[in-house]
Amino acid sequence: MKAANATTGSTGGPARILVVGSGGREHALAWRLAREAGVERVLAAPGSDAIGAEPRVTCFPAVAATDVAALTGLARREGVGLVVIGPEGPLAAGLADALVVAGIPTFGPSAAAARIETSKAFCREVAAEAGVRTARGRAFEAPGPALALARELVAAPRSPGVVIKADGLAGGKGVTVCDDLPAAERALAAVFAAGGERPGPRVVVEERLVGREASLIALADGQTALALPAARDHKRLLDADRGPNTGGMGAYSPLPDLPESLAAALVETVHRPILAALARRGSPFRGALYAGLILTDRGPVLLECNARFGDPEAQVLLPRLALPLAPLLLAAARGGLAGAAAGLGLHGPLLPTTDDAAVAVVLAAAGYPEAPRPGDRIDGLGAGAARRALVFHAGTGRDPDGTYRTRGGRVLAVVGLGHDLAAARRRAERAAGAITFAGLQRRHDIAADLPPEVTRAPAGAGGLAAGSGR
Ligand SMILES: Nc1ncnc2c1ncn2[C@@H]1O[C@H](COP(=O)(O)OP(=O)(O)O)[C@@H](O)[C@H]1O
Ligand SMILES: [Mg+2]
């Protein structure tokens, strides 16, 4: 609580907030935080030209997101009352650990707690301890036994295949969903060919499950979890889920097939037990705990955890939050979410939302994902920022004359808001359609993946059954 006057705004939230990162998620965070009462200034490191163009936002482009010493120094020097860490790289690099040692409230877990994302074997271990249902499978250090399990899973009656997951952070490229054993053999060979000798598990082999996926992200303070609404992203480059995997080509929220009753049950059966298990291990998790789920016909199953907001999920979730975000992030950083929730009169583990649905359409550069081409001039940004639409920049740079150009694989996330998903989708489509650049790649079916009859609760609406499927 030291230096509370210098660092705390009039609303009990932090007056000066440092957002770490430079992508679309961080643009959404900075945009949201800078317009909240009590927030005097948002700093972003490194930020981006577009983030710096937001009112009350200052960027520090020379400070890299993984430069722990420089970021800690910056936060101290600038009297920052809260640091919000966007991407996973800085978490794995121990940024939160260093900031906490420096006495700076930090939203983002320690490197030890972030292992829930950075090691898929660790995630399975913690989930097992917490009684959270995951796909049948195991972690392996050697290829022989891994292949044996893959063979067994593929041979099971009506098996749709097997999934091979490299253990460490892989930027969305570590997972191979295999239809058959030869594909699994190739994927295993690739995992063991990459990287040198290191101790511990190298790969996770899992049964392949079938169902729609969903993300449920909760703000966590080590113990208490308060969930943002459920969201769904679209990972494949092309319409109808064809083409290569990407960082995410779009997202939407809410999910007609994941009602609030199920979301509340999932917080109790997934997030809270995982937080408890991490705390028991001496690594309390403070930050955004992201549960990646698959909704099977036997109920939801946990596929993975991430230690941060999703990108582009954050771009659809943050505009829908009906409460100020800054005080909640600070409460999470300080271990005081239960008190904050009580003070806000919240009942249950779900954060209140606006009546809006939100749909994000990502505009990606020519050559993405293999070799994105930089430098293409972006036109129509003004028209894109239409009524009830938001444009978040993921990979752009601005010329001295104000022209924006592509600089990165995912270039923009265009978010439409509306009274339902169809209206939000129309707004996103219209705004996205106004923006052009050479080689632009985008999907036209974001939030159009649900057949009309999918408006009822899926099986297992009572939550995620522990223990089964192991
Ligand atoms: N057991 C599984 N069954 C079916 N699909 C899976 C399974 N595990 C992962 N996937 C698919 O692979 C994608 C990536 O896996 P995930 O565990 O989320 O890792 P990452 O996001 O780190 O690449 C998932 O979104 C899902 O589409
Ligand atoms: Mg994932």
Image: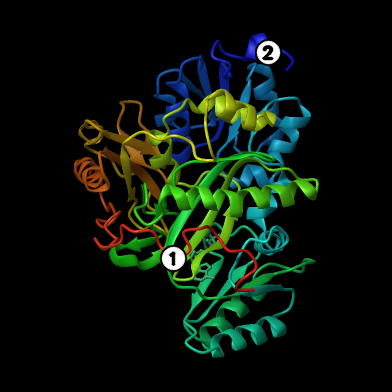
Q: Is residue 134 left or right of residue 436?
A: right
Residue 210 screen position, x and y as percent: 45, 72
Camera-nearest residue between 457 and 63: 457
Quadrant where the image shows the C terminus = bottom right
Q: How many numbered marks does the figure carry?
A: 2
Tell me if residue 23 can be seen.
no
Residue at image point 24% right, 56% down = 444
Residue 462 screen position, x and y as percent: 51, 58
Q: Which residue is mark 2?
A: 4
Which mark, by number, is residue 459? 1
Residue at image point 73% right, 60% down = 129
Residue type marked 2: Ala
Disc 2 residue: CB within 8 Å of ligand 2: no
Camera-nearest residue between 400 and 120: 120
Helix, strand or loop under label 2: helix
Residue 12 screen position, x and y as percent: 58, 16
Q: Is residue 187 left or right of residue 6?
A: left
Helix, strand or loop under label 1: loop
What is the distance, in whole Å, between disc 1 and disc 2 at their CAs?
A: 48 Å
Residue type marked 1: Ala
